[in-house]
Image (tube, helix red, strand yellow):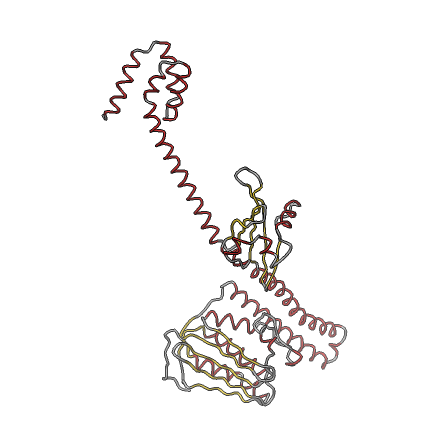
Amino acid sequence: MPDRDKSHTKRQDVFFRVLTPTAAGAGVFLLLGAATPLGVIASAFAGLAAGSALALYFAANLHASIEDTEKELHGLIDVNLSETIYEKNKLETILRYMTDGTVAVDTGGRIIHANKAARKILRMTDDDVRRKRYDDIILRFTDSLTLGAIISDLADGKVAGSFSYGGASFDVSFGIFKNSSGDEGGVIIIFRDVTESRKVQDMQVDFVANVSHELKTPLTSIKGYAETLLEGGIDDPAMTQEALGIINSEVDRMKRIVNDLLQLSRLDTKRQVWNMKPADIVALVRMAAKKQGVTAGNKRQQLNFISRDKSFILTIDRDRIEQVVTNIISNAVKYTREGGRIDVEIVRDEANVYIIVIDNGIGISELELSRIFERFYTGNKARSGDMSGTGLGLPISKQIVEEHRGSIDIQSGLGYGTRVVITLPIEGAGPDDSGEI
């Protein structure tokens, strides 16, 4: 046993032998309060003030108890400081990596904190945060979210707002925070970029409206001719033949729309089943061009297929890529006037195969070109003279090619024809010259 502990034990033994019963009773009370070093100090001073003989024992050990207390307090401070630093670092990490912008402003309008996302959204520099008031920053974008406006909104029970700039949209939420005294310390303001979600919502609304319109048109036509037949037109063989022909054509159109919608749904929800196998891309494109030859011939168009390779093997979903190529070539035939020319060419480099379709047709205006991959967008039907398109072919084609990690690029000018390039990655595929043309 250490000397200090032996000495302490010896003093206890001597002291308790001389205690009177009364002093012992008082000592029990003091001992109960001396369970910790702080308790020892408190008991010593309390005992001395009451004149207790037992207090002499505690007073004799007061120096050691103070040392023990100092160690205990240091330990508590270290633990509390460590916990505080941990919580501070955790909070800073959360704020730093939040995608939402977070700004804390005191009651005087001074910016206390602005995370990285907030600085990006509000275009703030470090100097802005240090030197400028919150109102100086937000007034660059809107006057409805100044500190005064936010406090007024909070007083009315409103906790959110919004603003837009530069094509971007933001939802804003805010609330009061308290200081260490429990008083109002300022306002926390959260900025959330909702640009993409707004676009999706708008697309959903447009999609429903467009589907309704596209289905309503053939349904109206079908109903009109059906009523004509019911009202006596069926007795006229020529009228009956015409009506049934149009009804059949409109039903086919509705079937194409529904099939396209189902395919879009499968692509959007990743439920499209892909049959990826080695296929001869040269033979595929040649056949797609040949199938459009009859339609091109009816318009006295010159449809040419060009390829240096007799064949070339790619791992693709053959049916889906044929769907894409057929759609592009049929568009070229459709939008090229009689007597025009369409060239379908395959070229490649070390990384990609390029399917190029060039026509000298009516072309696409700059405005239409920017919208060409929008769903249901069919361009200027009056100019093309065609009403059969659903406006879903190119969006579907784009998604199919992108699922093959490729791309579609369209270049055009009104009255100057169109050039479409479908790019498909080779990814280790190689030429196969054993096939015959």
**Location of residue 167 with respect to 321 vertically, above or below:** above
Query: Residue at 61% across / 71% down in the picture?
Result: 376
**Location of residue 258 with respect to 46 vertically, above or below:** below
Residue 24 image offset from top left, x and y in percent: 35, 12
Residue 203: quadrant of the picture: bottom right
Report whether 412 appears left or right of 232: left
Query: Residue at 55% across / 58% down in the picture?
Result: 122
Residue in front for this viewpoint, 105 or 333: 105
Residue in front for this viewpoint, 181 or 343: 181
Residue in front for this viewpoint, 405 or 391: 405
**Location of residue 63 with respect to 313 vertically, above or below:** above
Residue in front for this viewpoint, 250 or 17: 17
Residue 254 image offset from top left, x and y in percent: 62, 71
Instruction: Give the residue at the far front of this rendering.
Output: 131
Report whether 205 appears left or right of 407: right
Query: Residue at 45% across / 45% down in the picture?
Result: 88
Instruction: Give the residue at the far right of this rendering.
Output: 231
Report whether 38 appears left or right of 174: left
Residue 365: quadrant of the picture: bottom right
**On-image quarter of the C terminus:** bottom left
Residue 419 image offset from top left, x and y in percent: 53, 81
Residue 118 image offset from top left, x and y in percent: 53, 55
Task: Count numbered badges in the picture.
Answer: 0
**On-image quarter of the N terminus:** top left
